Image: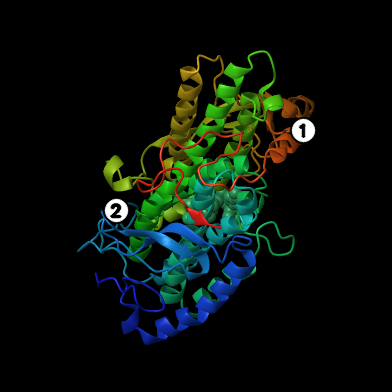
Amino acid sequence: MPTVDTTSKIPNNVDLASDRRLQRALEKWQPGFLEWWGDMGPSDFSENDVYLRTAISVDSDGWAHFGHVRMPDYRWGIFLEPRQADRRIPFGDNLGTPAWQEVPGEYRTDLRRIIVAQADTEPASVEQQRMLGHTSPSLYDMRNLFQVNVEEGRHLWAMVYLLHRYFGKDGRNEAEGLLERRSGNEDRPRILGTFNEPLSTWLDFFMFTMFTDRDGKFQLLALAESGFDPLAMTTRFMLTEEAHHMFVGQTGVGRVVQRTCEVMLEHPDSDPAEHGAVPLDMIQRYINYWVSSSNDLYGSEVSSNAAKYFASGIKGRAWEEKRYEDHVALEGSYEIERVENGRLVKEEVPLRNAMNEVLRSEYTVDNQKGIDYWNRIVARHDLDFEFRLPSRRFRREIGLHAGFHFDLEGGLVDEAAFENGCPSWIPTQEDRDHVESLMEPCLEHGKIAGWIAPPAKGIQGQPFEFDYVRL
Ligand code: BYC
Ligand code: FE
Ligand code: FE
């Protein structure tokens, strides 16, 4: 792997300087990116110094540099994990053959489609989050928001590099398209559903980084196994950055729960909402909303696309090499449930066709750990409440369960019962109004808004009072 070049216009460890054409093409894309960042990135705060980590190498220790920078000066770069010598395709029909260093013609369309879908989510999330800086509950949180934003910008760079380097003119066109679509726009929306939903409060932001960035984790884990080596190497490095995004979500929600518990103990006889906290059942409704939306991001339970991706070696399972023995997956089946004649029936489907559901199952296990973490916070306060994950069938718009109605436990219900249940299952307008009413910025050093507890510790050994953002 060439050494890391942090001084050129586009920092990289892919020896960009040796490929003048590619370098020029990316340098031509760069102003468009910066213009997009100016228009659609964090609203305001572009003149403020923010305590950010910047990727400067791919060594497992010391890959990041921490320091105050203005966001527009962030060094967005291209970093791939070092290539493993003699890497082989770890699954599918091409199992054991040398990993591809260039795109095989027969898989070109599928690979491009996957890379574009992945790429599209990155700027989409930045667009969704662009107004949140104005209502930050603390400087610490504001810094975390901006950290997530600049890194999603870098993930866009990671995918655009692949498009430019490996997909010729089509790839360059797709790279342009990524700067043209807009989250929530009627005429040119982002590709996947969740990435068009508004993120109007910090509670939504924490839920999103907990549950939607976690879809990112699992999709990236599946792509990190890819037989297309450059995709595997770039997603592996993206995963190291992703961990912090999910930390922001899990601890963010945890701190909201913590604060609510404190308020409940202080005022045992009244509604915590009256004291500026978010009631636990309201938090549960936000969980139900974002989990169900994010569940759709895995696609249909039975998918010939997924089977094809697995067969060709483009997209594997999470931890494919480490976790599984049978990497061909032609034998064996996977049990799914589907509605037939008005009731749920179990059905065995060929394993390859169920790969979306296999990934969604892993995701659900990971989600449950977050739920358990929040429940431990409640239990520490001796309060009687338990958070639960909604059923995977709840509120689905993609896949086998779309078009039917299910309750939180996954029981089939009719439309009337569903409509009846919704006010206690997903945030109501009153819930949203309440949470929105709490979104008063708190931007003094060492201070925090009343609806959330301070973090257990600061960033990179700094205290909570640190000047994470210089206003
Ligand atoms: N919304 O066979 P099916 C992240 C479409 S997040 C709208 O079931 P397939 C991040 C699908 O495209 C990770 N449409 O699906 C997080 C197909 O359309 P066409 C993002 C949807 O292809 C936070 C049709 O429905 N990465 O990184 O097996 C912040 C039926 O297709 C949706 C990836 O997703 C939806 N939710 O699987 C920042 C990885 N779901 O072709 C970043 C790349 C499905 O019939 N993507 N459809 O028109 C993929 O691997 C696959 O495209 C999917 C879908 C898993 C998304
Ligand atoms: Fe990302
Ligand atoms: Fe992320």
Quarter of image, res 260: top right
Camera-side residue of 326 and 372:
372
Q: Is residue 262 above or below residue 237?
A: above
**Percent x, y for residue 254?**
50, 32
Name the residue type under label 1: Glu
Rendered image: mark on residue 90: 2
Instruction: Answer yes or no: is residue 389 visible.
Output: no
Dot 2 lies on which element?
Answer: loop
Rendered image: mark on residue 400: none
Q: Quadrant of the N terminus?
A: bottom left
Q: Residue at x 59, y 34 (%)?
A: 287
88 horizontally vs 370: left or right: left
Task: Give the alpha-carbon distance from disc 2 to disc 1, as whole Å.
Answer: 50 Å
Report if the beta carbon of the residue with label 1 is closer than 8 angstroms to ligand 1: no
Q: Residue at x 43, y 45 (%)?
A: 352
**Percent x, y for residue 438?**
68, 38
Dot 1 lies on which element?
Answer: helix
257 horizontally vs 269: left or right: left
Q: Residue at x 40, y 47 (%)?
A: 459
Q: Quadrant of the C terminus?
A: bottom right
**Percent x, y for residue 213?**
50, 47
Name the residue type under label 2: Pro
Q: Which residue is mark 1?
A: 430
Q: Is residue 422 above or below residue 115?
A: above
- Local crowd size for mark 1, using a 10 Å CA cut-off: few (<14), some (14–19), many (≥20): few
